[in-house]
Every structure is written in structure tokens, then in C-alpha cells.
Image (cartoon, grey):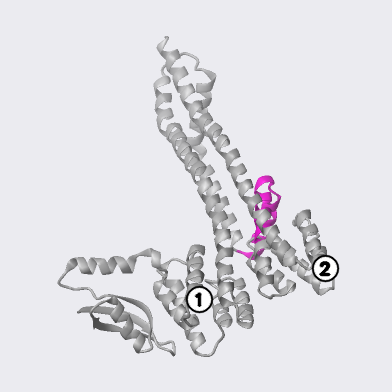
Amino acid sequence: MHTYRYSAMDHQGRKLSGQLTAPGLTEARSQLRNKALYILDISLAPNFLNPFSILGALFRKLSPKQYRSASAADKVILFRQLALMLRSGNTLTQGLEVCAEMTEKLTLSRSLLDVLIRIRSGSSFAAAMDAQGRNFPPVVSKLIASAEVSGELQATLERLADNLERGAAVRRQLISSLAYPIVLFLAAFGVFMGLALGIVPKFAKMLEGKSQDLPAITQAMLDVSAWMIDYGAYLGGSLLGGILAILIAYTTRPGKAVIDRILLRVPIIGSSIRTSGMAQLGWTMSMLLSSGLTVLESLRVMSSITGNLRLAKCFDKAGSDILSGRSLAYGFQQSNIPVMVQHMTGIGERSGELEHVMHEIGKYYQHNAEIRIKAMIAMIEPAMTLVVGGMVAFVYIGFFKAMMQVSAG
């Protein structure tokens, strides 16, 4: 028999904690379920005669992984698990309870338990998910509300998982592609600063007693090093202050709106953001329309989940045009929405296949976004090579030319 320490919640939402004895972890969980308790955490109670047991319990509590917010991958796994539980004949509450126990993220587990308690108290699944705005975007509650009416909850959860997975795949590809150039640039910048602030000043002292004129590139290297020593701290402070100011402004809605508008006008970055936004528009609106939501409701959901506020404003304007009796194609006649999306939307409205057209738009622009990411990385890598090579070559050529001149007398 083992002793387990647990924390759980009852059907009224009160948190309970204590200890119990059971042959194994499965039996301990069964004991708590038989008492109608929702498990928050359960683990072996530390044996104070065994120091390794105490250290193991301490490391589990201090692990930062369980306190991080839920990622897109966590939500994909959750929706797929919940759909599988429903397909296997389990009830929604049983599926939620099992998913809450299986997830490693403490914040997501507590959100699911809160959803479970609200459902037990008579709330709908959609309303309970809507109350968890920190972990789930509005599109989740909207789709679930529609699925509860149509009875297609399992299919809706699978669509949600597919949609989140597609967006996560694009972000993952972008991050993995940019990792190498960024690391290369930081390493080269560190080498350059080490040479400019550490090696070059010592080299300059060695040349002070020489009456010869130094090569132009060597003199330029010494001048850059002296300038960095004198004003480098001010430059670094100004850059750091500017970055912090931008980040702080980005946390406010007016500042984010201005920065988002500027980003859309940057040649390469703006087109990439616009392409990704159109891919999200196509996939999400196709999913929402197929779940029974109206075009106006779909646009409102799109506006609430779009990261770029300028694009979100475009969707708001399209919704206002629909309320005024105009078509979606007319509402999309804006500078930040590509002409192809405007024409394809009009075709979908006239043929009555808007859902299918939006799906094709999402497929096309996601493929286009992947191509743009690859092209951008293909441009960045040689540019980084030139920058890094130029920085290192500048220092080494100046150093060795001076050494050769001094050694030649």
C-alpha cells in the first residue's frame, strides 16, 4: 500500500486536500471519483525517511512546465482526445474529467475542471468554454454553441483541432527557419564586439609607439573601436530603450493598432502577415460556415481572433456593410484584402458555395504563406552570410595588414 497526497474539488467548487492509501495510482484515483471529487493533483506523499522521495516531490512542484499557459499543441491534443472519448461512447463530463487528469499543464487542467463544474451546475458547454477566455479563443465557444444545436460536437471538435494544427504548423515552420540565421547573427555580433572592445584596444596600444602610417582599413578599425568604447553604452541603452518602448506600446490597443498598420506597409513582412491573415480567414470562415454560423457571426469571430488589428478592422467593416444590406464581396473591397479574395468571395456568394470557396482560399493562401516563408529565409541566409563575413573580414584584414606592415619595418 502507498500513501498519496491529493487536492480535489467537489461539485460545489470547494477545494479539498488530504491523504489516502491505495495499492496504486489508479486505485487512488478511483477512490476519489467514487466520492464525486474532481482531481486537481495527486502524487505519492513524500517519505521523510527517504531524502530522494522528498527531492522528487520538490522538483515536481517546482517544475515550471505545469504552470505555463496552454499552447496550440496542448489544445489540439485536448480537442482530439475529447472527440475520441465522445466517439467511444463516453459522456461529455466523463471526457472532460479524463482530459483534465491527462493534461500536464496545471492552468489548462483547472480550466477544464471549471468547465466541468459549470456543466454540472446546469450551464451549457459553450457558455462554460466562453468563461475560459484566457485559455480558449471566442471561436471555440461559438463553434461549440452551434454544435450543441446541430448535435455534431464530435465533428466540430475535430475541425477545431485541424484548424489549430494548421496555424501551429505555419508558426513552427517560421520559427525553425529563422532560428539558424538569428543564432548566426548573434554569434557573429558577439565576436565582433569582443574583438572591437577587447582585442583591438590592446592592438592599438602596441602600435602607439610606431611612427609609421597605418593602413586605411586598420585606422578605420581603430576609429570604430574607439567610438564603440566611448559611445557604445549610449547606443546600446538607446536601442534597448527603443525596443522596450515599442514592446510597451504594443501592449496597449492604440499602440498595437499603429504598429500593426506600420507592419502591413513593410515590404516583405507586410505581405507575409497579409497572406497568413487570408489563410486564417479562409480556413476559419469555412469551418464556421460549415458549423451553421451566419456570415455576419463568422466575421465577428474573425475580428476577435485576428492578431493584426488593422485586418480585424477590415473584417469589422465588412460586417457593417452586410448589416447595411451589401454583399460580403463588396465588404471585402479594401486595400488590405487581396483582389483575388474579393473576386472568389463574389463567386462563392453567387453560386451558393461560399463555404467551399473559403476552404479553397485558405488552402491557397496557406500554401502561398509557406512559399513566402521559404523565400524570405532563402533571402535572409545569404544576407546574413554577407553581413557576418563583412564584420569578421573588416577586423581581421585590418589586423593582419597592420601586422604585416609593422613586421616589414
Which quadrant: the N terminus?
bottom left
386 or 286: which is nearer to us?
286
* Amino acid under disc 1: Arg
Q: Are marks 1 and 2 in contact (CB under 8 Å)?
A: no
Q: Which residue is mark 2?
A: 327
What's the distance in space between the residues labelled 1 and 2, CA to CA? Answer: 39 Å
* Extreme-top residue of the structure: 409
Assign a secondary structure to mark 1: helix
Q: Quadrant of residue 253 in the image?
A: bottom right
The answer to which of marks 1 and 2 sits earlier in the sequence is 1
Label placed on residue 316: none
Place of residue 99 in the rendered image (x, y in percent of width and height, measured from the top left): 44, 74
Q: Identify which residue is drawn at 84% across, 73% down.
A: 324
Assign a secondary structure to mark 2: loop
Place of residue 78 in the rendered image (x, y in percent of width and height, measured from the top left): 48, 70
Q: Within 10 Å of the Cα at label 1, are there few (<14), some (14-19), or many (20+) other Cα atoms?
A: few
157 or 276: which is nearer to us?
157
Is the magenta region chiefly helix, strand or loop? helix
Asked if residue 270 is among those painted magenta in the image, a careful observer would answer yes
* Amino acid under disc 2: Ser
Q: State the extent of the magenta-drawn residues as a range.
A: 252-280
Place of residue 370 in the rendered image (x, y in percent of width and height, measured from the top left): 61, 49
* Extreme-left residue of the structure: 49
Q: Which residue is mark 1?
A: 87
Q: Identify which residue is drawn at 45% across, 82% down.
A: 94
The reply to whether residue 309 is visible in this rendering is: no
381 or 80: which is nearer to us?
80
